[in-house]
Image (cartoon, rainbow, N blue to C red):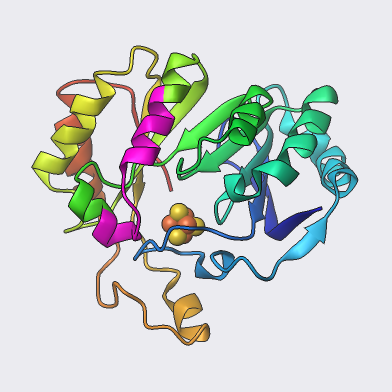
Amino acid sequence: MIKVHSYETFATQDGPGIRLVIFLQGCMFRCMYCHNPDTIPLMGGKEYSAEDILDLAERQKEYFGMKGGITFSGGEPLLQAKELLPILKLLKGKGFNTCLDTNGYFLSDEVKECLKYTDYVLPDIKQMNPEKHLQLTGKENQPPIDFVKYLDAEKKNYWLRYVVVPGYTDGEEDVKKLWTFIQTLPNFQRVELLPYHNLGTSKWEEMGRPYPLKGLAACTREEVDAVKHILSEYTDKIFIRG
Ligand code: SF4
């Protein structure tokens, strides 16, 4: 059984085509801007069997078309890698396209097995600067960097994701560090820029916790374009999401 926080149908922002996105419960990061803080606690969520997930997928199948499928997000889906593995196997066995939206903190043998049954991976790079990453997420950034290197070495289909948080991740030096890292990845396909928004504020307050970025305005089009502009000196494989 796997712990599911919620799911969304007809999603178009989390992987190729039209997708069923399943948000799994639990995350080891504490991102200051998390817009789904209720997915962070390990406790909670509703238990689903592999057959329950397959049933959800079957009911959406006609909308997936050639490209779409199922994305596991969270929370951090690979926190439940052991439970996720048989589900990914089942879905792949039925011909579904599978995708993982992950912070890339874990690279255990179970995670590597999960990746064998995953068509697309959306790994986050939250910050290339180690101290700023720690401040932003509560965790060090070397594991996610190593995770992306692994995906690249294994020639997996992966799309990097970078949340543009004004004042936290959009500094020129930080963005250039991101590109320096990308240059080391021979199988790099694209980077997706996700403009920060503050829609999760009320969820933090409902949970009785102060929102760490209270008062920070949502990222404007100009701010995300400024990051794109820095990266576009080096690549045109940049997509703005959201
Ligand atoms: S990795 Fe995602 S789910 Fe986890 S705290 Fe960060 S934004 Fe929230």
Q: Quadrant of residue 215?
A: bottom left
Q: Residue at x 65, y 24 (%)?
A: 67
Where is residue 167 drawn, in percent x and y?
16, 59
Depth check: give the residue in front, 188 or 82: 82
Chief secondary structure of the magenta portion:
helix
**Is 135 colored magenta in this rendering?**
yes
Quick check: 22 above or below 29? above
Quick check: 26 above or below 96? below
Where is residue 58 drawn, in percent x and y?
86, 38
Q: Quadrant of residue 219?
A: bottom left
Looking at the image, residue 2 sits to the left or right of residue 205; the answer is right
**Is 218 colored magenta in this rendering?**
no
Quick check: 156 above or below 3? above
Q: Residue at x 30, y 63 (%)?
A: 218
Magenta extent: 134-149
Depth check: give the residue in front, 35 or 240: 35
Does residue 171 appear in this view? yes
Q: Quadrant of residue 99?
A: top right
Q: Residue at x 31, y 49 (%)?
A: 140
Tally the numbered discs. 0
Where is residue 60 drawn, in percent x and y?
80, 41
Depth check: give the residue in front, 45 or 42: 42
Quick check: 195 above or below 25? above
Q: Residue at x 36, y 64 (%)?
A: 33
Looking at the image, residue 121 sits to the left or right of residue 135; the answer is right
Does residue 229 appear in this view? no
